[in-house]
Image: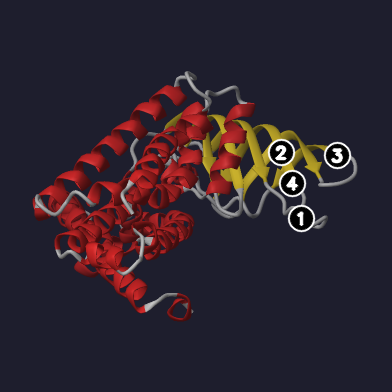
């Protein structure tokens, strides 16, 4: 499709940019994988995992690693591709033929936008890949302890469990709340919430929830409530030991699942500012792939003397500053100094404004 939209020079610029982008986006995760494997190989071998399982676990880890480095990959590709055009006087030749700098880098803008879209899609696939990796590495089998207090557990099918006490040995939950998110616009699949005094687990029967109420919350119409002595939830298939697994990290939940998890914690009175920042970052970080390109393009035009070392310095320096800003604003948002959503977007706003100011001032 783009072949009909872009000129031969546009395709050349996009091709050079893409080579560096994919080389960085695929190469950096491989380096991270090597370091992680070196640190954890003994632990995996002690679990009697086969070489095939260990290798497969890193295949499922690759999407998350790639997502983490995509903004840096866009920046490296932008700086090095434009730097090469500058050093080889190709930008000067393009200007002499009547093509402005802004028009010349238009293919890079397209590539950065596609990278942002790819990062958004990848961020929704990562939780499923992480879950599969945890299963392969048998993470749930190596949890310790028999009790857990005041926790929320993000389950499958849009479910969130909350309890004040879990005792694995007795198969017992106390202060139970189960929420199932419905489908918007589907009256046959409404949202419902179960609140109960306790629940007990049987190997053959699963969880039996006792002394509670079921609230059905449809999109339209009145809410309906039922009081029950006991209720058996056949979809609640997690065993007590499964519920002892470490809480899912925000990276292990999709945008909607994390939203439901936050809502469950809010009802229990927990502070969810940090989780709200993490949820907003699921959108802000992929969009940064597009924004950071405008910051890198003007800087790369002064790259002809420094060469590769200068490009690496700019890219690494900018990436480090960007990551530090994310951590700082995340901490501020988590403590309530800024609204969580604003805290997640501050780095993008700062880099976007500075990048656009430098971009429009580049000599065309």
Report how many numbered discs are placed on residues in the image: 4
Contact flag, marks 4 and 3 (Cβ < 8 Å):
no
Q: Secondary structure at mark 3?
A: loop
Sort mark 4 into few (<14), some (14-19) or many (20+) by Cα contacts within 10 Å.
Answer: some
In the rendered image, the vertical position of residue 305 relative to residue 339, given as above or below: below
> Which residue is labeled 2 in the image?
194
Cα–Cα gap, marks 4 and 2: 10 Å
Cα–Cα gap, marks 3 and 1: 14 Å
Give how far across and how far down residue 307 sits, in percent. 10, 54
Between 92 and 14, the one lying in front of the other is 92
Contact flag, marks 1 and 4 (Cβ < 8 Å):
no
Cα–Cα gap, marks 1 and 4: 7 Å
Cα–Cα gap, marks 2 and 3: 13 Å
Contact flag, marks 1 and 2 (Cβ < 8 Å):
no
Rendered image quadrant of residue 64: bottom left
In the rendered image, the vertical position of residue 125 relative to residue 196, given as above or below: below
Earlier sequence position, callout 3 versus callout 1? 1
Q: Secondary structure at mark 4?
A: strand
Q: Quarter holding the C terminus? A: bottom left
Q: Is residue 238 visible?
A: yes
Residue at horizontal 35 percent and vertical 44 percent from the top: 361
């Amino acid at each position: 499709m783009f072949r009909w939209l872009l000129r031969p020079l546009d395709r050349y610029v996009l091709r050079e940019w893409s080579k560096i982008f994919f080389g960085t986006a695929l190469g950096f995760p491989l380096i991270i994988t090597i370091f992680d494997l070196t640190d954890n190989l003994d632990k995996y071998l002690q679990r009697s995992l086969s070489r095939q399982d260990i290798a497969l676990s890193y295949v499922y880890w690759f999407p998350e690693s790639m997502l983490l480095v995509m903004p840096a990959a866009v920046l490296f590709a932008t700086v090095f591709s434009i730097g090469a055009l500058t050093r080889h006087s190709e930008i000067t030749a393009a200007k002499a033929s009547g093509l402005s700098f802004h028009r010349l880098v238009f293919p890079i803008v397209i590539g950065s936008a596609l990278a942002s879209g790819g990062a958004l899609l990848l961020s929704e696939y990562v939780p499923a890949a992480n879950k599969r990796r945890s299963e392969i590495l048998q993470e749930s089998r190596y949890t310790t302890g028999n009790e857990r207090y005041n926790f929320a557990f993000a389950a499958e099918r849009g479910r969130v469990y909350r309890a004040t006490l879990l005792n694995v040995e007795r198969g017992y939950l106390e202060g139970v709340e189960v929420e199932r998110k419905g489908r918007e616009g589907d009256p046959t699949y409404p949202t419902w919430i179960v609140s109960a005094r306790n629940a007990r687990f049987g190997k053959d029967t699963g969880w039996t929830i006792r002394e509670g109420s079921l609230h059905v919350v449809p999109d339209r119409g009145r809410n309906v409530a039922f009081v029950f002595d006991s209720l058996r939830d056949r979809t609640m298939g997690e065993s007590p030991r499964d519920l002892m697994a470490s809480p899912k990290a925000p990276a292990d939940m999709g945008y909607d699942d994390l939203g439901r998890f936050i809502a469950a914690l809010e009802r229990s009175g927990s502070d969810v500012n940090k989780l709200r920042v993490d949820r907003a970052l699921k959108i802000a970080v992929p969009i940064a792939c597009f924004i950071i390109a405008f910051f890198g393009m003007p800087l790369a035009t002064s790259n002809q003397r420094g060469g590769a070392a200068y490009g690496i310095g700019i890219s690494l320096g900018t990436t480090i500053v960007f990551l530090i800003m994310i951590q700082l604003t995340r901490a501020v948002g988590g403590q309530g100094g800024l609204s969580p959503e604003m805290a997640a977007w501050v780095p993008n706003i700062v880099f976007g404004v500075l990048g656009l100011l430098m971009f429009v001032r580049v000599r065309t």
